[in-house]
Amino acid sequence: MKIKIKDAHAIHLSAPIENPIKTSFGVMDSRHAVFLVLEDEHGLQGIGESWVNFPKWAPWERVLAFKKGYIPYLKGREVEDIASFIMDMAEAFRGPAQQSGTMGAYLQAVCAVEMALWDLAARMERVPLNRLLFEAPKTWVRVYGSGINSPIQWEIIDEHLEKGVGLFKLKLGFGREEDTKNLEDMTSHLGNSAGIAVDVNRKWSIDEASEWLDILREFNVEWLEEPLRVEDEDKLKTLYEKSPVKIAGGENFLVDPVGFDAQLLADSPLDIFQPDITKYCRIHDAVSLLEAVNQRGGKLFPHFLGSAPGQAASLHLASGCGDILMEWDVNPNPLRTSLFKDPIEIQNGLIRIPDAPGIGWELDSHTSFSVRAAKS
C-alpha cells in the first residue's frame, strides 16, 4: 500500500454550549474541533482530529500550525509505512517544538496527521480501520459516561442510564465539601444501577490523595484517575502501592514520539492506562502500548473528550482492547452528534462500529467537506 498525498487542508469548527464543562484546572464554555483532511491522488480522503480543548486559543494556534508547517511538509509526500513516515515527520518538527517549549501542541498535531493517514489507508483498502489495526477486533464497544461536574445535570445522567450505560466518571478536585457532596449525591442517585469512577485532573497533592483513599473505598469507586498534581507525580508509585482503589491515567503522558518506549510506559504505576490518540499518543504507539499493558496484566481504556472523528477512531482502537471500554462525554456536543450523517449512538450501553471503510461514519455535507472511500 502506498499513499501519495496530493492535498491537505485544516478545518476549524465551533459550537456554543449551554452548560460550561468545569474541571479542576479550567472551564470549557464552548466546543471547538480542528481536523486535518488528507487527500490522495485518486481523490480519496482521510480525516484526523487534534485535541484543542485547552487553552482557549488552541484551535486557532493548531490551524496555523497545520497551514504554515505541517501541510506544506505533507503535500506531495509518499507514504509506504505509516509509522515510519510519522517518525520521520516527528523528527523534522521536534527541534522547533523543543526550542519553543510547545511539545504538547506539536504532539497533538502529529496525532491528527497519523489518524488521517490510517483513515485514508483503511478507505483505500476498503476495510474498517480496526481491521488494519487488529486481527480480530470486536464490532462493538461498551462505553462509560464522563464529563460529569458540579452542578450535576441529573437529566443527562438519567438519559444515559436509559441507554444502558453502567458506569459514570465524576470529576473531583473542587474542595473536600463540594467533592464529598457530589460523590454522595451520585451514589444515592445511581443506587445499584451503575458504578462510579472519579477523575481529579491532577489536582491533589500526595497528602490529599492519601486522605481520600479510604473515602473512595467506602463509596466503592471503580478507579481514581490522575489524582496527583504535576509536581507530586513522582510519588504516584507510593500512592499506587497503598491504594485500595485502582489508579488510572495516561492521557497526559507527554512522550517524545521519536523515542517512544511502550514498555517503559506500561511499567508506570497504573492499573488502567488511558492513552488519547488525538492528544499525546499516536495510533501505532497506542497499539504497542496495548501489547505491553496486556503482558503486564493491566487494562487499557482509551481516553477521549472531543468531536465525532476522534471519537470514531478511538472506538476502533477500543474494539481491539481485551477489556473493551471507551470514554463517552455525557454532555451535549453538537460537534460529536451533528457531524455524521448517521450519528454515533449508544444502545444497551454499547456502540456498534459500522462495517464500512475507514472510521466508518460519514461526515454530513453541512461541514463543507466530505470524506470519500474507494469504490468496490
Image: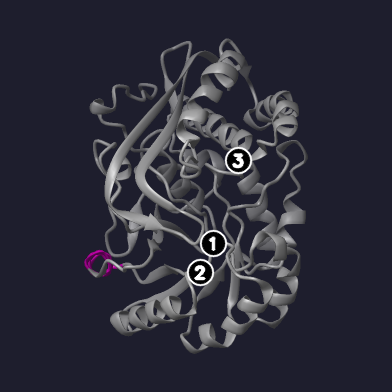
Q: Residue 164, how many percent across, how many down?
A: 29, 68
Given this view, does label 1 or label 3 mark the residue nearer the observer? 1
| Amino acid bearing label 3 | Arg
Q: Secondary structure at mark 2?
A: loop
Q: Residues within 10 Å of mark 1 (few under 14, many from 20)?
A: many
Given this view, does label 3 or label 2 mark the residue nearer the observer? 2
Q: Residue 367, how many percent across, how many down?
A: 29, 27
Location of residue 184 by image quarter? bottom left
Give the distance between the C-alpha atoms of the residues marked 2 and 1, in whole angstroms.
7 Å
Quadrant location of the N terminus in the rendered image: top right
Q: Is residue 3 visible?
A: no
- The circle drawn on residue 201 is 1
Q: Secondary structure at mark 1?
A: loop
The residue under label 2 is: 173
Residue at 41% over, 14% down? 43
Location of residue 97 by image quarter? top right
Residue 177 shown in magenta:
no
Q: Is residue 280 left or right of residue 146?
A: right
Give the distance between the C-alpha atoms of the residues marked 1 and 3, in whole angstroms.
21 Å
The residue under label 3 is: 282
Question: Dominant secondary structure of the magenta stretch?
Answer: helix
Residue at 65% over, 36% down? 102
User: Would you say the residues marked 2 and 1 are in contact, meaning their CB atoms lie under 8 Å apart?
Assistant: yes
Q: Residues within 10 Å of mark 2 (few under 14, many from 20)?
A: some
Q: Sequence order check: which comes first, mark 3 or mark 2?
A: 2
Q: Secondary structure at mark 3?
A: loop
Q: Sequence order check: which comes first, mark 1 or mark 3?
A: 1
Give the distance between the C-alpha atoms of the residues marked 3 and 2, in whole angstroms.
29 Å
Magenta-tinted stretch: 155-164
User: Would you say the residues marked 3 and 2 are in contact, meaning their CB atoms lie under 8 Å apart?
Assistant: no
